Amino acid sequence: MAPRSRPTARQERLGRELRRLREAADMKAREVAGLLSSTSAQMSQVEGGFAGVSEERVRRLVAHYACADRALVDALVAMATERMQGWWEEFRGVLPPVFLDVAELEHHAVFLREVVITHVPGLLQTPDYARAVFGYMVPELPESELAPRVEHRMKRRTVLTRESPVPYETIIHEAALRIRVADRKVARAQLRQILDEMECGHVTVRVIPFDVDGFAGASAAMMHLGGRVPRLDTVLRDSPSGTAFLDAESQLGRFRTLFRKVENAALGPAESADLIHHLAKEL
């Protein structure tokens, strides 16, 4: 089978985890390749996410690495063997690959936690709100590029509406709720949609009000995507230079702590709903 030209973020993660296990066992790639009647080049392709790997080979690899964490091994096997063609594949070649990576990671997550400061989170946005956000890009996007971005963002909501929805918790700063990316009508509809989502048992929204003391986390925006085991968690961070997927244990620990600190500054769900109702009435 020919190597993949561009592995997805999830495929790269599987390869990275296999490499981490090999390095923890203090084994060289050529040494492992010899045990599997393979080559160093093939091992490099697997660990880079450019080549698929079977369940049998995953289990042989981790056995050589003396990994006794059965839950981790089973999670890695699932990553290797779940080769579904999700809805996001229809956007391949239409949108940048990172859009597809985000949708795939959300689909497989066991929970989603998000912190947003200046914009309503994408999973809760209305079409008009999303269109206003994407429409503000410089250089301005033509309709042929703007429309699929909005459509993709709306389809991401599948993780919240499917038969077995992903538990979703988001912390939103009051600034994001007050900033009008379009007009009053769009802002009012957006706040109402958030309130509607809060009625779902699997969606939790908490607000950080402007008048809270001790919140210095203006740069805390992130999404924490839960893996089947904590080691396979991923943190997504957006910046002017692009989207970064962070998964080193030291990084994950740092962002788990950051989320807890931000959480301490937020109102409870009921108080948050009252604040959002108040902001909607002001419009």
Image (cartoon, rainbow, N blue to C red):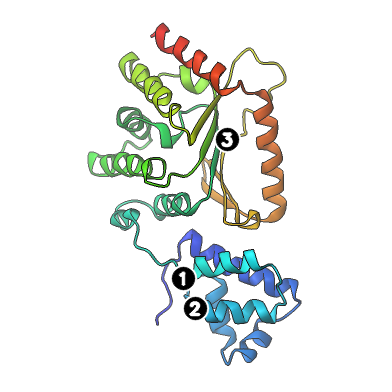
Give the number of the disc on residue 54. 2
> Cβ–Cβ below 8 Å for labels 2 and 1?
yes
Give the mark nearest the N terminus, 2 or 1: 2
Q: Residue at x 57, y 64 (%)?
A: 75
Helix, strand or loop at label 1? It is helix
Of the residues tagged 2 and 3, which is closer to the observer?
2
Residue 155 in percent (x, y) is at 33, 44
Give me the residue at 53% from left, 50% from top: 110
Is residue 247 in view?
A: yes
The number of numbered discs placed on residues in the rendered structure image is 3
In the figure, is residue 265 to the left or right of 57? right
Quadrant where the N terminus sits is bottom left
Residues at marks 2 and 1, CA–CA distance in whole angstroms: 7 Å
In the rendered structure, the answer to whether residue 69 lies left or right of residue 237 reads right
Rendering quarter of residue 30: bottom right
The residues tagged by marks 3 and 1 sit, at their Cα atoms, a distance apart of 32 Å
Could you tell me if residue 181 is visible in this image?
Answer: no
Q: Residue at x 38, y 35 (%)?
A: 137
- Residue under circle 3? 221
- Asked if residue 78 is positioned above or below residue 221 in the image, the reply reads below
Circle 3 crowding by C-alpha within 10 Å: few under 14, some 14–19, many from 20: many
| Residue, disc 1 | 81
Tell me the element at label 2: loop
Q: Which residue type does callout 2 highlight?
A: Ser
Q: Where residue 248 sits: x, y (%)?
A: 67, 56
Q: Earlier in the sequence, mark 3 or mark 1?
A: 1
Whole-percent x, y for residue 73 in the image? 61, 69
